[in-house]
Image (cartoon, grey):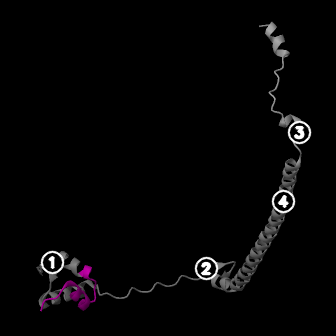
Amino acid sequence: MELKTSDVAIRLGVSPKTIQRWVRKYNIPLRRNEAGHYLFDEKTVALLERVKFEQGAAMEAPPTPKRPPTPLRNNIPIDALHESIEPEIARVSSRLDQLERQLEQKADDVVSIQLLHHRQEMEEIVARLTALEQLVARLEQQLNNRPPSSHETSDEPKQKRRGLGRVMGLFA
């Protein structure tokens, strides 16, 4: 029975890279499949088990590092400081949320007041425009109701004024 590198690695409890490294390091002759992967027989697996035993390279969980001692601040453990600060942080966060809501309300109030002022200004402008339209209408009516003047109706050609032109002609 022929095994792949990953199968041998699982069987020996090491990584596939470790198996490949041992094969290269100890020049273990192996056959390869068409993809170039190593093929292991039982004899080679037994040889690798002996290498593992000699190397002591069993894949064990790395020892968990000891947790460093809790740092102190003013001779008080940091964890204790965090516990004492958490309620204060919650209080400050709550107050911040409340202030944000108040700020939004104030902003809404300011916008409402500005809209009211703009509406009043628009109403004043409309009132002035209406008054101007009425004034123009009255003036047009007065102009249309007025009797024509004498100089507007005469068809006589205007007489040419002679005066300044004659005087200017003397200097030419």
What residue is at 84 percent from the left and 37 percent from the top? 153
Numbered mark located on residue 35 in the image: 1
Query: What residue sits right under mark 4 in the picture?
Result: 130
Q: CA distance from mark 1 to mark 2?
A: 55 Å
Nearer-the-camera pick, 135 or 129: 135
In the image shown, does 38 or 111 lie closer to the viewer? 111
Between residue 158 and residue 53, name the one nearer to us: 158
Mark 4–mark 1 distance (CA, rounded to whole Å): 93 Å
Residue type at mark 3 is Ser
Circle 2 sits in a helix, a strand or a loop, which is it? loop
Seen from the viewer's position, the closer of residues 13 and 90 is 90
Q: Main secondary structure of the magenta part?
A: helix
Residue 145 percent across, percent down from the top left: 88, 50
Task: Specify start and end residues of the magenta stretch as a single range.
Answer: 1-18
Mark 4, secondary structure of its residue = helix
Q: Amino acid at mark 2?
A: Pro
Tell me, yes or no, if residue 161 can be seen here. Answer: yes
Mark 4 vs 3, N-terminal side: 4
Q: Quadrant of residue 156?
A: top right
Which residue is label 3 attached to?
149
- Residue drawn at x 82%, y 23% as measured from the top left: 159
- Cα–Cα span, label 4 and label 3: 31 Å
Q: Quadrant of the C terminus?
A: top right
Q: Position of residue 64 (x, y in %)?
A: 44, 86
Can residue 4 be found in the magenta stretch? yes
- The N terminus sits in image quarter: bottom left
